[in-house]
Structure formats: structure tokens, C-alpha cells
Image (cartoon, helix red, strand yellow):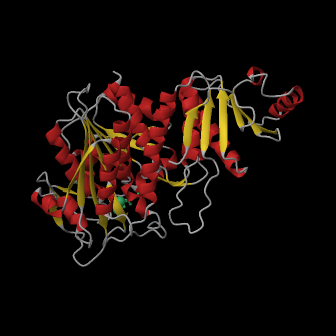
Amino acid sequence: MNLYLRKANILPKTENLAVVTTDIGSIDRRILKKNELDFVRKEAKKKSKFITINQYSRLVFICLVDGNGKGEHMILESYRRAGDTLVSLLNRSKATSVCVTSKEGQEELSAFAEGMLLGNYQFLKYKSKPESNSLKKISFFAPQLKQQDLDATKTICEAVYHARNLVNEPVISLNATDLANAFKGMGKDAGFSVKVFDKAKIKDMKMGGLLAVNMGSIDPPTFTVMEWKPSKHVNTKPIVLVGKGVVYDTGGLSLKPTPGSMDYMKCDMAGGAAVGSAMYAVAKLKLPLHVIALVPATDNRPDGNAYTPGDVITMMSGLKVEVLNTDAEGRMILADALHYAKQFQPELVMEFSTLTGAAAAAIGQYGIVAMGTCEDDTRRDLHKSGEMVYERLAEFPFWDEYDELIKSDVADIKNIGGPMAGAITAGRFLKKFTDYPYMHFDIAGPAFGKGGDSYRGKNGTGVGVRLIVEYLQRRASK
Ligand code: BES
Ligand code: ZN
Ligand code: ZN
């Protein structure tokens, strides 16, 4: 991230200034002349949230954040969105730097900084004449905010940038091997270990689901194992993260039927990108937790030897799966990863995947569809974490009866349910490969933004990264 984020020791006189406040009355007298303050009051009556004053040597932005009568998490989200708005105003006026001053609390200002950094993201790699954002330097004049807080915010945003970059990279330059190599790079940078299993090793381990999906590909699959195990960790059993790494999903022989739906299927490794990028933040923040992340990866294509509807696949666990739709490939590769996770006897497995159109259809881009078998207190912490970072969970029922829908005539189970409850039957399929507390997060809705959603931006959103890091930070401080 080429943004400089520091504390300021003095209130600058000529640098662009942003005053973040819930109350105009509390603005520092040194900043505005009387007539300027009158103007601000007049504008605020018109319900303007952002008031810009041109002081010739610089711009002063008064950012009025609405902090009243809402829950804590809604207030933090208002700060993030305000941070994003400020960044767009600054870039529009070609400003290169800004000093933010505020009397608000540390958490609120961290959220504001987060909104600024996430809102300033750009993916310009393939622009011959890139129009880079002008903003390069942000400082905070606010004694309640420590440099350490700013560094932590920057680390988490860097992790989100990593996840977005991976999602935005097309399959022509990011196949399964490239994805594994990207994880290796992040591991080297942040200090966690990365092992990559190649096709021979994957065959040795009899990962039938991953190998089946890979049959139509000319590129080999990979299975990446990442681990962060600091000498001091508060959990005796590890927390395991699992992410879907389908670097491109054509649907395979059951070619995607919906017009245009393939256009953004480079996003089908967003779960893998989220867990790998979360590892980056966990290691950089040196969280006192033992965390492992697993990413099975391949593309899903309809080439010569592609797996077909009607095939029966023996999975790593030994369970036999009748394939009735090759487009339900995510669960095939994740099943092997979930089975592989059993050896760690994890305290919790959190699995992220762009798994079903049904999840996206049910709640849209505004949250994550979740379901699972973990204890109520874990579940509460997960929901709380989701609210705090505004990657909210919509929990679906996970009743045993749904297993009826994935019974097969010829094998143990089939890889699709009927037309009903598609997100849940996918989750129940995955549950068959677990024997530990498990939570499944279907991010098909929020993984790829259509724009107009503030700091989440267009294309890869990096959803999941902040949720995982927030949950792990809470777990570490218990
Ligand atoms: N990768 C897709 C799901 C998806 C949909 C991701 C929209 C992102 C946005 C997944 O592999 C898929 O194709 N699922 C099928 C399952 C069906 C065949 C049972 C679906 O949801 O249609
Ligand atoms: Zn698919
Ligand atoms: Zn898919």
C-alpha cells in the first residue's frame, strides 16, 4: 500500500485539514475564522455531512459523523463510510496529503482510518495510463489515537488489499500454482509458514474431490497449508481456516447456464484469498494464537477428460459422491480440505467460499450466509465480530432433514440438492466431512462488488478478511 499513515504532533497550519466531529461546537478555535464557522453552521442546518472551506493555502473539510441513537456497530460503520467519502473528496480535488484531527474515541478514529484506506484502493495493473489517486499521505492529530493503532489498521487494510488483488487478477495470470505462489510470498513477508502440495502429493493423499474437478484443466491443482504458531498461544487446539480456491469457474461440462454469469467467475477463489490474507494480518499483528489455513485450488473447465454428471467420485474421506452437476465443484474440493483438517483436532473450523448462487439470491451483497455446528458462545462471538466490522452474518437453519435432499440412488451422497434450499444443502454436504465445531460462510453475495457500496468498492471486496481478524483478536484476548 503506497499510503503513508502517521500521527501528527502539531496541528498543521497549511496542510489540508479534516475535522471529524459529531458536534460543530467542539471544533478547535484555531482552525476556523468566525465567518467560516458561521458558514459551517449554516450548511450543517441544510443537513450537509461534509462541508468544505477553501482557505486558499489549503482545504478544510468538516466531516459531520452521525453518532446518535444507533448501536455501537452502526456508529463505527458511519465512521468508515465518512472516511471513504473524505478520500473521494480529496482525490477529486487532487490533494496529496491530509491531516485528520478529532476529539472522538480511538475505536471511532480507527474505523475512520479504515474507511479511508479501504476507500483509496485501486487495481491499476492493467491500465497503460493509470490514473492513480492523488492522496499519498494521511496524518492524525488526535492524542487518543496511538501510532500502534494506526499500524494495526494499516496491516488489516493491507490484508484486505491482498485479498482484493488476488480476486481481481484474471485466471490467465492466476492459476492454482500462481495462487499458491502468492500465498508463499505473503508468508515470507508476514512470517507464517507455507507448504504447497503438488498434483503428485494430492494424488498420494487421495484427494478425490480436488482431482475430479481438476480433470478438465490443463493446469495442475495445488493444496496450500499455511500455519502461524507463535511460541506463546492461548489456544491448545488450533483454529483452522479453509477457503475455496477455484481460480475460475466455467461450470465445467455443466457449463454455466446464466448469460453473463461467467464474467466475474475469476472471483471464485475469494474464500481462499480471504483466509490467506487473514493469515497475513494474523502474523503481522503477531496474534498469540495457533492458526492454520487450508486452500485447495484448481480451475473448473470442460476439457477432454473433464469429470461428468453421473461420475461417482471417492473422496479423501472414503465417502462416495455422485456428481450430478459439475458446477457444484466448490463442495467437491472443500470436502477434501475439511477432511484433511480433522488431523488437527481443531477447536473451530471457519470455511469461506463463494459457494452458491442461492446464498447470493437470498440476501444479496449485504452480508454473509452462515451456518454450522459450533457452540452457542462461539456463534455469538462470530455474530458480534460480523457486526463490529460490518460483515454481518445471516445464519440459515442447519436441520438434519435437509440431508434427505442430497441422498443419492447410486452412491453415498450426490453433489446437488433440489431446487430448494440450495445454500443449505451445500452446507450440509460439507458437514459430512467434518467431525469438529464447524462454521460455513457462503460469501457468493458480497465477494464481488458492483460498486456504490462505499469503501467496499467495485470488484474484489476482500470480504471475510476483517471478520476473521476481528474474531481472532477477540479469541486471543480471552
Ligand atoms: N461459484 C459458484 C457460485 C457463485 C455464484 C459464486 C454467484 C459467485 C457468484 C458455484 O460453484 C456454483 O456454480 N454453484 C451452483 C451450484 C448448483 C449447481 C447446485 C449454483 O449456485 O448455481
Ligand atoms: Zn460452480
Ligand atoms: Zn464455484
Give the quadrant of residue 284: top left
Q: Nearer the viewer, residue 228 or 354?
A: 228
Relative side of 388 to 327, left or right:
right
The residue at the far bottom in this view is 304
**Residue 201, image quadrant:** bottom left
Query: Residue placed at 20% from the left, 27% from the top?
Result: 236
Q: In the rendered view, tell whether residue 199 sits above or below residue 78.
A: below
Of residue 222 and residue 15, the one placed in the foreground of this image is 15
Image side of residue 421 versus residue 95, left or right: left
Which quarter of the figure is the C terminus placed in? top left
Q: How many marks?
A: 0
Whether residue 106 is situated above or below residue 422 in the rendered picture: above
Q: What residue lies at 48% left-to-right and 47% top-to-bottom?
A: 363
Residue 195, image x, y percentages? 21, 50
Q: Residue 274's x, y, as percent?
A: 38, 47
The answer to whether residue 341 shows anywhere in this view is yes
Name the quarter showing ligand 2. Answer: bottom left
User: Where does residue 339 sit, x and y in percent of width and height?
Assistant: 18, 47
Q: Nearer the viewer, residue 287 or 210?
A: 287
Judge whether residue 78 can be spotted in this image.
Answer: no
Residue found at the very far right of the displayed protein? 35
Question: Where residue 340 sits in the image (x, y, percent)?
Answer: 17, 47
Residue at x 69%, y 46% (from the top left corner): 90
